[in-house]
């Protein structure tokens, strides 16, 4: 119930020209942390339909560079020359090679979610594996001192991943923006200041 009827954030996204309401999760995190700024090289994992990428590009103001990857095509009609999107799977070596060629990155964003089944145990396990892979990518493609923001479904073994972030980043936070739906069990992990292994 409630998903079919557009809520405040969905209607706001329509008015402001964003493909999805998820943009306001990133906007709130940005306001709290100052994660994104001009001249950064940013990777957006799970970039479709494109709201996070669009918001990030506005903050970059024509500087830096943004790379987006998703299993689905991005739904933005046009994007600037400092952006590159491609359909791919972060688990595939060929996709990783493309990401590496465009890197390294100052910030990696991931609002990616697994195909959900309605079974919380299955869904949290799938989310865990996705985020684990995103962390692996971040460890290889972030610059020293870089940052990672990743969505995770709560209720599984997510603390294992947070502990991993604690060993690799100087600062970690758990964030749950107001735009997250009340019934959702998603939250966000933020790691700032990647250290060398």
Image: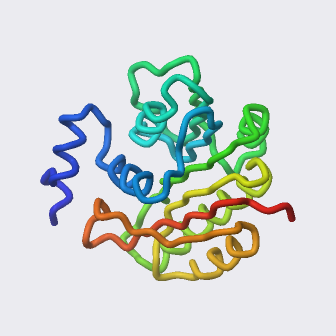
Image x and y of residue 173, in percent: 54, 71
- 41, 121: nearer the viewer: 41
Image x and y of residue 71, in percent: 54, 42
Name above or below for residue 81 compared with residue 180: above
Q: Is residue 123 visible?
A: no
Residue at 74 percent across and 37 percent down: it is: 103
- 187, 185: nearer the viewer: 187
Give the quadrant of residue 128: bottom right
Q: Is residue 185 left or right of residue 88?
A: left
Image x and y of residue 97, in percent: 79, 38
Residue at 55 percent across and 57 percent down: it is: 149
Q: Is residue 167 left or right of residue 67?
A: right
Give the quadrant of residue 130: bottom right
Name above or below for residue 189 compared with residue 34: below
Image x and y of residue 159, in percent: 59, 82
| Total tally of numbered discs in the picture | 0
């Amino acid at each position: 119930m409630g998903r079919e009827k557009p809520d405040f954030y969905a209607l706001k996204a329509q008015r402001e020209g964003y493909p999805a309401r998820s943009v306001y999760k990133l906007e709130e995190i940005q306001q709290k942390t100052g994660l994104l700024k001009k001249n950064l090289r940013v990777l957006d994992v799970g970039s479709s339909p494109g709201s996070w990428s669009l918001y990030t590009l506005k903050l970059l103001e024509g500087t830096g560079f943004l790379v987006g990857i998703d299993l689905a095509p991005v739904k933005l009609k046009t994007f600037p020359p400092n952006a590159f999107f491609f359909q791919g799977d972060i688990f595939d070596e060929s996709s990783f090679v493309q990401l590496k060629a465009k890197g390294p990155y100052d910030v990696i964003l991931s609002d990616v979610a697994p195909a959900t089944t309605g079974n919380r145990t299955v869904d949290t396990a799938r989310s865990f594996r996705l985020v684990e892979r995103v962390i692996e990518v971040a460890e290889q493609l972030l610059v020293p001192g870089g940052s990672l923001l990743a969505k995770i479904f709560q209720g599984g073994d997510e603390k294992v991943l947070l502990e991993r972030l604690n060993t690799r980043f100087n600062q970690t936070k758990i964030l749950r923006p107001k735009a997250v739906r009340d019934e959702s069990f998603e939250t966000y992990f933020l790691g700032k200041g990647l250290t060398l292994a």
